[in-house]
Image (cartoon, rainbow, N blue to C red):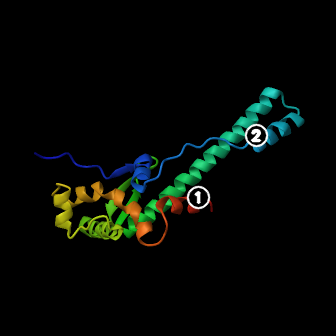
Amino acid sequence: MVRPRMSAVLDYERLCAILGVKAPEFWANDNEGWLYVKNQKLQEGASEEEAEQAASDYEQEECDEAERRYRNAVEFVATKLFLVHGLELHEHKDAWHWQVMPEKSWKDALRKIIITINGVGFFHVSSIRDLCEGCNESSVRRVVLTCLHHIQDWPRVYGEGTTSGMIDRRFSR
């Protein structure tokens, strides 16, 4: 039986899942900013409705900016983690989608993923063949794509904290 080709294209939600973080929804939580904008518009002679609309527009812009910054932080951290595992993320034609490609080869990427898996220490993978058999796959490419979630453990193995912490630090810049 021939299996369908496994896609190496990741959308934003899948990338977050691989990294072990949630794709947050941003909402306004800035009453002071909203009130300031509303009061400014009222002082400028706007009606109550116009002032509230301006304040709501301000809130939406703030949320959009926070979401953009968070997505950029996720992409930055993902790019770093994929690179240390011999993988590259190439922008896809669709917005917020990436094509996963090996830097050298799929085997080289899998070797690096195995190092991270073994670094966590829950179990030991002795070889590429061992992991392929464990995943019931003959294609190294498919095994790499199946095991991408292990890259989220790299920061813990190498003293960088957690993937979530890396993203939060980048987001806070």
Question: Where's residue 73, x and y in %?
Answer: 53, 58
Across and down, in percent, residue 171 comes to 58, 58
Task: Choose the circle earlier in sequence order: 2 or 1.
Answer: 2
User: Residue 85 sits in which quadrant?
Assistant: bottom left
Q: Report crowding for label 1: few under 14, some 14 to 19, many 20 or more residues within 10 A (C-alpha).
A: some
- Amino acid marked by disc 2: Trp
Q: Residue at x 83, y 27 (%)?
A: 47
Q: With 73 as the anchor, is 46 left or right in this view? A: right
Q: Secondary structure at mark 1?
A: helix
For this orientation, the residue located farthest to the front is 122
Say if mark 2 contacts mark 1, CB within 8 Å.
no
Q: Could you say whether the residue bearing mark 2 is in a helix, strand or loop?
A: helix
Q: Label 1 belongs to which residue?
A: 171
Q: Is residue 74 above or below residue 46?
A: below
Q: Residue at x 41, y 52 (%)?
A: 15
Q: Identify the residue at horizontal 85%, vertical 37% (top origin).
A: 39
Location of residue 58 by image quarter: top right
Identify the disc placed on residue 34. 2
